[in-house]
Image: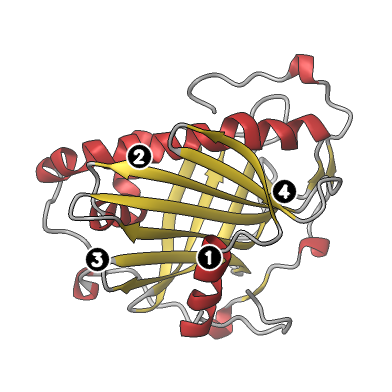
């Protein structure tokens, strides 16, 4: 996402186009899971324990692309369906379609919890939608003692309309968790955690219209920028979050017997 340079920038049309290609193309991707409406792929070397690139796809019947786009933007609603989330909030806006935000999530015990600070940008394209992010540093939001600061090299969603009231959701992520994770954790993510997370987003989409009717129904700052009351952030305040400047946690010796994934965590 950083184009190999050191400067933080707001993704442009070519970045969104490249992201879309990665979602839609199959070359170089290995299928890890394919059941029902969910498929999970990994990219590149299977032996690499840390920075894995994973892609998921789910077909969502009875949920429009527009509704799913709202679900993925609506931080108030996220607290309802994302049981892995500890905290999320917007830090500030960069442009009408880019902002900076914070997200922390529960890792299955005995792993330490992770958090991110990311620059996020979004693009509606006809009946399709994209949201992409990558990690940045913000001086007021340094790494915290109670979390391992992870790095999103590139993460995002592509929502493709599939008729009036159904869509296909792609989720692609390349994250450095800052730690030597055991091989069984990586396997569990693609076989268990990832499919469950996709189904959770789908269920959230089915329930969103009814929830939104009762919770500030006309408030959608991601659609109506004039509703956005976030403070402005300058690109000059931000810098790239390099993985090698962060603490690296060795959790590779943690045994699978000690791991606990509840239905809520997964």
Distance between the alpha carbons at the discs numbered 4 and 1: 15 Å
Q: Which residue lies under the disc numbered 3?
A: 221
Q: How crowded is mark 4: few (under 14 residues within 10 Å), some or many (20 or more)?
A: many
Distance between the alpha carbons at the discs numbered 3 and 4: 30 Å
Residue found at x 73% / y 25% = 110
Q: Residue 133 carries which label?
A: 1
Mark toward the start of the polypeptide (1 vs 2)? 1
Q: Is residue 118 visible?
A: no
Q: Which residue lies under the disc numbered 2?
A: 202
**Front-most of residues 212 and 237:** 212
Mark toward the start of the polypeptide (3 vs 4)? 4
Looking at the image, residue 29 lies above or below residue 10: above
Mark toward the start of the polypeptide (4 vs 2)? 4
**Front-most of residues 138 and 213:** 213
Task: Point out residue 158 in the picture as x, y percentages from the top left corner.
Answer: 43, 61
Residue found at x 20% / y 71% = 224
Q: In the visual, does 212 lie left or right of 196?
A: left
Q: Can residue 73 be seen in this view?
A: yes
The image quadrant that residue 209 belongs to is top left
Q: How crowded is mark 1: few (under 14 residues within 10 Å), some or many (20 or more)?
A: many
**Quarter of the figure that contains the C terminus:** top right
Q: What element carries label 3?
A: loop
Q: What element carries label 2?
A: helix
């Amino acid at each position: 996402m950083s184009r190999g340079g050191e400067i933080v920038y707001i993704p442009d049309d070519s970045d969104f186009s490249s992201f879309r290609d990665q979602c839609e193309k199959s070359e170089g991707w290995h299928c890890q899971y394919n059941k029902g409406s969910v498929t999970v792929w990994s990219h590149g070397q299977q032996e690499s324990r840390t920075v894995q690139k994973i892609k998921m796809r789910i077909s969502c019947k009875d949920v429009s692309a527009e509704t799913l786009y709202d679900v993925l933007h609506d931080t108030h609603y996220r607290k309802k369906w994302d049981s892995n989330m500890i905290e999320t909030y917007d830090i500030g806006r960069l442009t009408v379609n880019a902002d900076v935000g914070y997200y922390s999530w529960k890792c299955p015990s005995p792993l330490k919890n992770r958090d991110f600070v990311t620059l996020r940008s979004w693009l509606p394209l006809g009946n399709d939608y994209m949201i992409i992010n990558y990690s940045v540093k913000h001086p007021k939001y340094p790494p915290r003692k109670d979390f391992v600061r992870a790095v999103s090299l590139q993460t995002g969603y592509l929502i493709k309309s599939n008729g009036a009231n159904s869509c296909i959701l792609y989720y692609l992520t390349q994250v450095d968790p800052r730690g030597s994770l055991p091989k069984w954790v990586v396997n569990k993510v693609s076989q268990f955690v990832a499919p469950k997370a996709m189904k959770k987003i789908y269920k959230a989409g089915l329930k969103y219209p009814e929830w939104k009717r009762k919770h500030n129904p006309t408030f959608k700052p991601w659609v109506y920028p004039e509703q956005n009351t976030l403070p402005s952030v300058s690109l000059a305040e931000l810098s790239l979050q390099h993985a090698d400047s962060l603490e690296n946690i060795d959790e590779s010796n943690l045994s699978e017997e000690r791991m606990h994934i509840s239905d809520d965590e997964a």
